[in-house]
Amino acid sequence: MMTSLLKMAASAGAALLPFFIIYVAATFSYALLNFLGLSGRSRPIFIGATFAVVGIGAYAISFVTDMIAQAYFRQLPFTNIVWPCITWSLIALCSLAICARRPVPYLARAVPFWLFGGMAFVASLTHPWNLITAIVLILGGVAYGLFAGQRGSTNWSSKSRESAEPCFSIGQYSIDTTIDELQDLTPLSPEEIVALNPGAMFDGEQIWHSPDAQFVGLQWNTILATVNRTIYKISIQWTGPRHQAGTACRDISILCTKDYGKQEDIVFQGSDLTAWRACDGNISLQMVNMGPESLLIVTTTSRKVSQFKRI
């Protein structure tokens, strides 16, 4: 009896081993892409890593599709493809889910599918069933490139999850408070306003140079946007050594994730942003590398902005 139980345990362990390996690989890939996206590493490395993980998913889809096609054309018995289809489908699902919504170009998501689709098309000259695989991959690349990409707006759907926490204060500044008690505010010149955000003014809006704010141990240049003297947006900028910027970026990300939950990587006006939703607005974080230095930009925006009248 004991021998039988040991054999059953060994068989179960061998059967579960592929799932454990997939879990470890998926966790590592997810953590790596998050690290590359938030650290001071160069953007090409982040895009290349995303491309590679998408490639793993595309290859897994090609493998599953090829086995199903061979079984359909009686090149393989159906009983021989069940287990491989399950494991490789899981690999494909994990890889593509990890890379979805990453701020990378369309081609970084689509080209891996097209590469394997092209190889399948060439193989179809001698093995006709590979044409099915080629079609699935080519169309799959188009679909994944389109629908797994970013949304180009910070106007989030009301169906999306919101945190119960309000946006944090930045130094002495908080959204939805008046500037009546603040001192040393200087309005931006018309030329500065045009350069900052042309054609996007609200009725009653003023934009101010403000005294520096202290945040995560650094001193930040600060701009406030107000409507009827109530702050609806706080934008702070800091420029310094890349390694210090990377540390600050990670500290801010940890703070926001703790208070507001999972981040969203989005593209807004051509820029890659990491964002979180609060109960009264949203918070965005951007890091731009400039040689040995980096620029950090943190912005909090009130949800009341949707009620303002444009002029």
Image: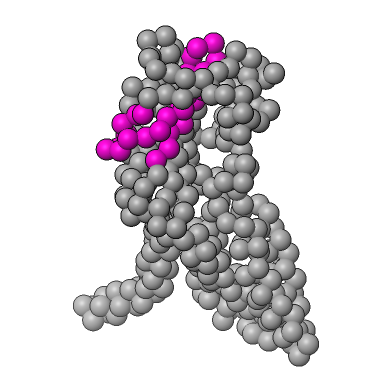
Q: Quadrant of the N terminus?
A: bottom left
Q: Is residue 125 above or below residue 165?
A: below
Q: Quadrant of residue 267?
A: top right
Q: Is residue 152 above or below residue 80?
A: above
Q: Report the residue at 41% width, 27% height from top.
A: 167
Q: Report the residue at 61% width, 62% height from top.
A: 109
Q: Position of residue 300 (x, y in %)?
A: 46, 30
Q: Quadrant of residue 40?
A: bottom left
Q: Mark yes or no: residue 164 visible.
A: no
Q: Nearer the viewer, residue 16 or 5?
A: 16
Q: Position of residue 306 (x, y in %)?
A: 60, 22
Q: Nearer the viewer, residue 155 or 132?
A: 155
Q: Position of residue 196 (x, y in %)?
A: 58, 33
Q: Quadrant of the C terminus?
A: top right
Q: Is residue 166 above or below residue 115?
A: above
Q: Which residues are magenta?
A: 212-238
| Residue at the extreme left | 2
Is residue 232 part of the magenta span, yes or no? yes
Is residue 297 part of the magenta span, yes or no? no
